[in-house]
């Protein structure tokens, strides 16, 4: 697949400090974000998609596989389009989807306006990169990441915009050191933006990725944020964009060492079956709670791209109870509970 020119993703602390100081002034400027701002975000997202695909293909090759991402460029009749890149049936990665989209919406769906009645009647555009990776080996966790920008506009009025995103980890046979590493990456990328960012967005992630009907966490969490702008966080557009870059780049910093450590680990058929059973929880969450899935379905989105996050195989077992003391029991008894991973 062709690789776009690399966007500048370096984050300068002085720039961040300056942007924070200018947040209120920029928030009052009706020209923010302008077409150039939106183009810069788009360029970063296109580049991020390409870099993530390259990194995952390298893991596949290193594990003896030859599967590659197949790019699928698409256009949306209502406006906009994107590129969906899917890798399937690999030796290391059973299925992965890394999707870029930039769509235009003229009638915002209920999933968008319910929390934001002030954008009703506005035209809008949304762009982002979203990915889910389902490894074949049960010792490698499923991972998910998303970064996005939403802008709603009306003639003669200032745009209403916000950023969202994050990444989270869903292990089947977790290792404590991996969980600590994952959250250390989260903490470190948040640190330049303020001491409260990591604990705030970690807690948000724990609350968001909770299966209420199971009273169970989807995984060990990570970061989640939404509706972040000058009003909600005191960050101007540039600071929000810098944070998007940090999160997008941080995903690879978090997941690649875990792949390296466990992709060649031996596993049994029983462990494989448990992986498929736990993938069922992933399916339940995405179809019942996930905002992106609901937004896509309600906005006449591209079904192939919306449902590409589904695992290729999953299973459900009636009243399955893992044996106390087993690794399968430890998953739900210890790991799938919100906790302060950095103090363990």
Image: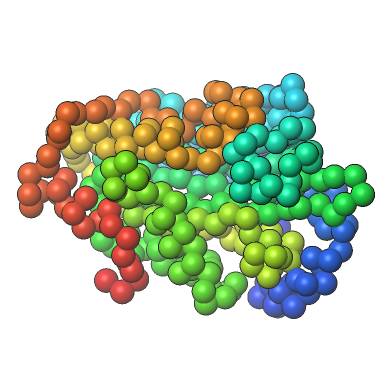
Residue 74 higher or lower than 255, as above or below: above
Residue sitting nearer the eye, 207 or 3: 207
- Residue at image position (70%, 36%) is 108
Q: On the picture, is 227 further left or further right than 215?
A: right
Q: Toward the viewer: 64 or 23?
A: 23
For residue 312, what is the image quadrant?
Answer: top left
Residue 20 makes an appearance in the image: yes
Work out whether residue 10 can be spotted: no
- State which quarter of the image contains the N terminus: top right
Q: Quadrant of the C terminus?
A: bottom left
Could you say where residue 117 lies in the image, as x and y percent from the top left?
69, 47
Closer to the camera in the image, 174 or 329: 329
Question: In percent of the image, x 26 and y 61: which residue is there?
Answer: 176
Q: Residue furthest right?
A: 156
Q: Is residue 149 left or right of residue 223?
A: right
Number of marks present in the image shown: 0
Task: Indicate how the structure is coloured in the image.
Answer: rainbow
Q: Position of residue 294 (x, y in %)?
A: 54, 34
Q: Is residue 315 above or below residue 62?
A: above
Q: Position of residue 209 (x, y in %)?
A: 41, 49
Looking at the picture, tell me which residue is in the foreground, 21 or 185.
21
**From the viewer's perspective, is 269 left or right of 146?**
left
Which residue corresponds to the image point at 74% horizontal and 61% vertical from the top-left? 237
Residue at 27 percent across and 38 percent down: it is 278
Please state the horizontal and vertical placement of residue 309, each as a whole percent of the image. 46, 33
């Amino acid at each position: 697949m062709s690789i776009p020119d690399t966007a500048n993703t370096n984050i300068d602390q002085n720039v961040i400090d300056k942007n924070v100081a200018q947040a209120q002034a920029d928030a009052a400027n009706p020209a923010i974000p302008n077409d150039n701002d939106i183009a810069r975000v788009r360029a970063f997202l296109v580049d991020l998609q390409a870099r993530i695909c390259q990194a995952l293909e390298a893991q596949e090759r290193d594990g003896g596989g030859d599967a590659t991402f197949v790019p699928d460029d698409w256009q949306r009749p209502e406006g906009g389009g994107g590129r969906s890149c899917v890798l399937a049936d690999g030796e290391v990665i059973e299925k992965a989807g890394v999707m870029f989209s930039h769509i235009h919406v003229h009638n915002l769906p209920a999933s968008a306006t319910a929390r934001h009645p002030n954008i009703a009647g506005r035209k809008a555009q949304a762009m982002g990169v979203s990915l889910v990776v389902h490894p074949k080996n049960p010792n490698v966790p499923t991972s998910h990441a998303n970064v996005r920008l939403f802008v709603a506009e009306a003639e003669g009025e200032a745009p209403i915009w916000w950023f969202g995103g994050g990444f989270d980890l869903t292990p089947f046979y977790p290792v404590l050191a991996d969980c600590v590493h994952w959250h250390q990456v989260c903490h470190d990328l948040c640190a330049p933006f303020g001491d409260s960012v990591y604990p705030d967005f970690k807690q948000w992630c724990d609350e968001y990725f909770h299966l209420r009907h199971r009273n169970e966490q989807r995984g060990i969490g990570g970061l989640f944020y939404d509706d972040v702008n000058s009003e909600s966080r005191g960050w101007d557009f540039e600071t929000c964009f810098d944070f998007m870059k940090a999160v997008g780049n941080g995903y690879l910093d978090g997941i690649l060492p875990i792949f390296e450590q466990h992709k060649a680990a031996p596993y049994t058929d029983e462990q494989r079956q448990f992986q498929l059973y736990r993938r069922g929880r992933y399916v339940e969450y995405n179809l019942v709670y996930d905002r992106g899935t609901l937004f896509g379905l309600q906005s006449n989105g591209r079904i192939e791209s919306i449902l590409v996050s589904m695992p290729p195989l999953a299973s459900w077992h009636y009243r399955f109870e893992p044996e106390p003391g087993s690794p399968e029991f430890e998953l739900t008894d210890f790991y799938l509970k919100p906790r302060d991973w950095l103090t363990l």
